[in-house]
Image (cartoon, rainbow, N blue to C red):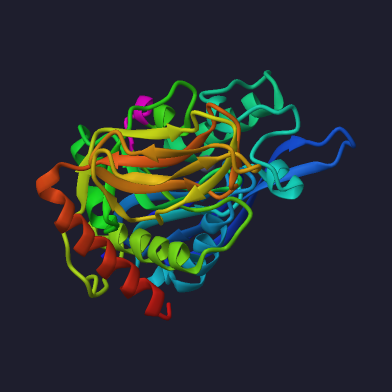
Amino acid sequence: MPRRPAFELADKIIPAGKQVSVKIPSVRLYTDTPIDLHVEVFHGIKEGPTMLVCAAVHGDELNGVDICRRLIKKLNPKRLHGTVMIVPIVNVFGFIQQTRYLPDRRDLNRCFPGSEQGTLGSRLAHLFSSQLMSRASHIIDLHTGAIHRSNMPQIRANVKDPVALKMAEAFHVPIILHAKELDGSLRAQASKLGCSAIIYEAGEALRFDQTAIKAGLNGVLNVMKELGIVQRRGSRVKFDPIVTNHSQWIRNENDGVIISRIRLGERVKKGQILGYSASPHGEMEQAIRSPIDGMVIGISNIPVANQGEALFHIARISTDQISEAGDIVDSFIEDFDSRVL
Ligand SMILES: [Zn+2]
């Protein structure tokens, strides 16, 4: 059988069956210090899809960085069908500064498609899109909640794209949130390029959350198995993830301290008390109620909030699915809390 042709990236040639680190010169700091985009490429011996796995598009979202690190240690290019490109840190600037944004406060995830001559974010987006995304057939983009906000492990995808839905279901976390592609986002650019992309959201910025990391690594490998890139056993705990097309943040209606009465993953009924907004001087205490039936998929970890600030993120789940959702989340959390991966 003829040998699979080599994969070329930047000026590197990656022969079939090899793992090669490729450092693509990207943008410079204003100290004239060059910054590389570091890509770990696994070029399998057999033909198959080309998958891009990336993290820290928001520089302070660290769980994905550790998922990539563990994934790099796990993959063997000699056993792979297809090609896998892994970028643990896309926004190197934000990662160094421990911030979501680029040095000019721009959000890289709103800079796509970018251009060769634009701002730093625009140039980085253009490079990432033209060099890596354009080569990929499938993308998994790893995120966490913003600073001081935790997300329950969840997938966000355009479920109207059958390939993205297949990837989302294979990832095997309890909730899939149908989310439209925001202008300038990596996912919108992927869609323009004709490739299917899903987002994994789990945990909180600037923290390693072991459950989120283990579930994320397992999820990425599950998607690779579904696409025929790797062979592995299926998940130990089987369930059909719940797909929902609506979620909403519940915001504080007063200014005060927040006494939370719920946890991430908890199921809530319409009208149920999620917590209380209270005056620190004890004069006022007002219940915060859920406007819908659903599940808590995001939560603010700061117990003080002004009026209008987001407190709880609820994904809508129909009444008849709520107890099923409860069983799924409980078994999922139990599985990954106990798992050594
Ligand atoms: Zn993010």
- Report the residue at 74% width, 27% height from top: 104
Report the side of 94 relative to 179 (left or right).
Answer: right
Query: Considering depth in this image, is 264 or 157 the residue closer to the camera?
Result: 264
In the image, residue 330 above or below residue 176: below
In the image, residue 219 above or below residue 271: below
The quadrant holding residue 195 is top left
- Residue 335, given in percent of the width and then of the height, sits at 31, 74
Q: How many marks?
A: 0
- Residue 83, given in percent of the width and then of the height, sits at 39, 55
Query: Considering depth in this image, is 21 or 192 the residue closer to the camera?
Result: 192
Specify the quadrant that holds the N terminus. bottom left
The quadrant holding residue 27 is top right
Part of the protein shown in magenta: 191-196
- Report the residue at 60% width, 37% height from top: 256
- Residue 100, given in percent of the width and then of the height, sits at 64, 40
- Residue 323, given in percent of the width and then of the height, sits at 16, 57
Specify the quadrant that holds the C terminus. bottom left
In the image, residue 273 above or below residue 104: below
Q: Is residue 138 visible?
A: yes
Q: Is residue 140 visible?
A: no
- Report the residue at 38% width, 46% height from top: 274
Report the side of 130 relative to 282 (left or right).
Answer: left
Report the side of 188 relative to 124 (left or right).
Answer: left
